[in-house]
Image: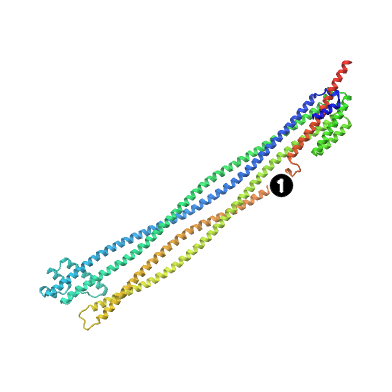
Amino acid sequence: MASKMAMLTLAMAAPAVQANEADPIGKVIQMLSDLQAKIVAEGKAAQKVYDEFSEFCEDRSRNLGFEIKTGKQSVSEATASIEKETATAASLTAKIEEISASISVNEADLKAATEIRNKENAAFVAEEKELIDVIDTIERAIGILEKEMSKHGASMMQLQSANSVAQALSIMVEASSLNSADASQLSAFLQNSQESDEESLGAPAAAVYKGSSGGIIQTMQDLLEKAQAQLDEARKTESKALQAYQMLASSLKDEIKYSTKDLSASKHALSSSNEHKATSQGDLSVATTDLSEDEKTLSTLHHDCMTGAEDFEAETKSRGEELKALATAKQIIQEATAGAADQSYSFLQQQMSSGADLANFEAVRYVRDLAHKTKDASLAQLASRMAVAMRQGGSAGDPFGKVKDLIRNMIEKLNNDAQADATEKAYCDKEMAETEQKQTEKEAAIDKLNSQIDSMSATSAKRKEEVATLQKELAEIAKAQAKMDKIRAEEKSAYDTNSAEMEKGIKGVRAALKVLNDYYAKTDKAHSSADGAGSGIIGLLEVCESDFTKGLAEMNSAEQTAVSEYEAASKENAIDKATKDQSVKYKTKEFKGLDKDTADANADKASVQTELDAINEYFKGIKARCVAKAESYSDRVARREAEIAGLKEALQILEGEAALLQRTSKRALRGVRVHA
């Protein structure tokens, strides 16, 4: 600017040297132009701040959207975990109650069996002691009888005259050979033996005998054998009862042991499930709190960003209104004060001619160069119009008037374009931001729904697969139980048949042994009997009896073991079935709920997709209006500012030259009046 003014000053020579002060109107116009430039610069700075603010809003909103999506998924996962652990805890609690009840029953059975065993053992001990005492008494009585019989005295005669054991015992008591307590014990045993024989054979026992010494002794020996046989039988019965008790107690203790172990494992699993549930509840609380805070922050951010956009739009509009007011004031001043300026600051046409032409030429050249630099057709057109106005000559009062008016009009047009462009930019920024925000929200919603649908579909498929597996396992349990029931029924039927046969065989052998023993024990047989062969047969029968008895005991033991194993397996199957039935019920309810939620989510997704399609279509139109341009807004602002600055500089060239000419003209006029 200084070099151009220097060139003009040199061209105009001495009269223009003193014209270096601007007129007041020009000063006002310059101040208005400077204020316009300042406002435009403030608008540019405000636009930069708003662009950064919009970018922050977009980034923060996107990040919060991702955080909310993650938070909702965490809430969903924690809720599902709590429901799963609740169902697991319910199933384990039911199992613990069932196992505890089973242990209580088994412990009660063991206690009852132990009490019965103790009573049986006490009864056996008493019976054994009594039989041992009876055997001892009988043996002493036989010894006494044999001793007395050998004396052939009065006692022997009395004993021979006795016609029953009771009489013989009474005689022995009177003779002080036997005390009354032993006699009473033998009488009681004899009476019990008679009652037992009558019940078993229906025939009288040896209550009477032939009056001979051998008869009473034989009868006492028979009593001795019966007592010994009864003692052996009692001991065998005690041994069998003890064995049966031991087997039953072992089975019950094993069942209690394994049930206790299973109970401990179930309690441990229940404790672990409760811990997992508590952990999931803590995670749910944290996730819910974080999600609530993120949603609240997003809502606040959206409000703040919208408020910022509205404030920027209002500032931009206000700034445009101020520019318009300044341009209007400048135009009014320029148009309204032109005549007054001509009257107040007229100068000689002769002195003005050369300087005005040079200033016009310089201004035209400067605008033409600016048009070439900015490639703006409107500036090129302005340069042409300025050249035409220069050739036609200026107005009588102001040789630069028409050219300056052309420049001012172009500046005003550029300012108006800048204001309109800024308003359009604010509108585009607002609409683009809001539409992009809506687009992001809908896309995030669809992503969330897709995630939920995928998660629910996968979980539902998994639960269906688990239900199918559980149902298959339940079918296998039912099949195995049915097979066990069939085998147990067959074993029970075989046991009933075989044990009955064994008991029948034992009774038969014992009856045969009694008959043979009774016969071969007689001493008054009328023929020579086969005692040796009979003894062999009796021995074989006793072996058979022992074998049959042992076989029956083993059969009973095997049956008890089979029953115990069957009941234990059946109980385990029942527990397993109850647990799996509960799992099937829960998982079926879960996947049905998931399927319903998936269908609802698909419907929501379709609705959101429709809204997103509408937003995308609107966004496409906004982009076509606001984005699809050959020149960006910032480029247009920079180009327009350069053009306005260039035009102002051209205007200053003209106004500066006019001021120089006006000052020269005034001094010349005052000099003429002095010399007149």
The answer to whether 619 is drawn above or below residue 202 in the figure is above
Q: In the rendered image, is residue 634 in sight?
A: yes
User: To which quarter of the image does residue 487 belong?
Assistant: bottom left
Q: Mark 1 points at which residue?
A: 620
The answer to whether 596 is drawn above or below residue 65 in the figure is below
User: To which quarter of the image does residue 132 belong?
Assistant: bottom left
The answer to whether 103 is drawn above or below residue 514 in the figure is above
Q: Specify the amino acid type for callout 1.
A: Lys
Residue 330 vs residue 485: left or right?
right
Kindly give the residue lying farthest to the left in the view shown.
154
Residue shown at the point (87%, 34%) measured from the top left: 388
Q: Position of residue 248 (x, y in %)?
A: 35, 63
The quarter of the picture where the C terminus appears is top right
Residue shown at the point (52%, 47%) measured from the top left: 283
Residue 633 vs residue 283: left or right?
right
Q: Position of residue 499 (x, y in %)?
A: 36, 71
Q: Position of residue 266 (x, y in %)?
A: 44, 55
Residue shown at the point (32%, 61%) measured from the top left: 114
Residue shown at the point (16%, 75%) measured from the top left: 163
The quarter of the picture where the N terminus appears is top right
The answer to whether 498 is drawn above or below residue 110 in the figure is below
User: To which quarter of the image does residue 299 belong?
Assistant: top right
Q: What element carries label 1?
A: helix
Residue 50 vs residue 526: left or right?
right
Q: Position of residue 369 (x, y in %)?
A: 82, 36
Q: In the rendered image, is residue 188 in sight?
A: no
Q: State the residue in front, 495 or 275.
A: 275
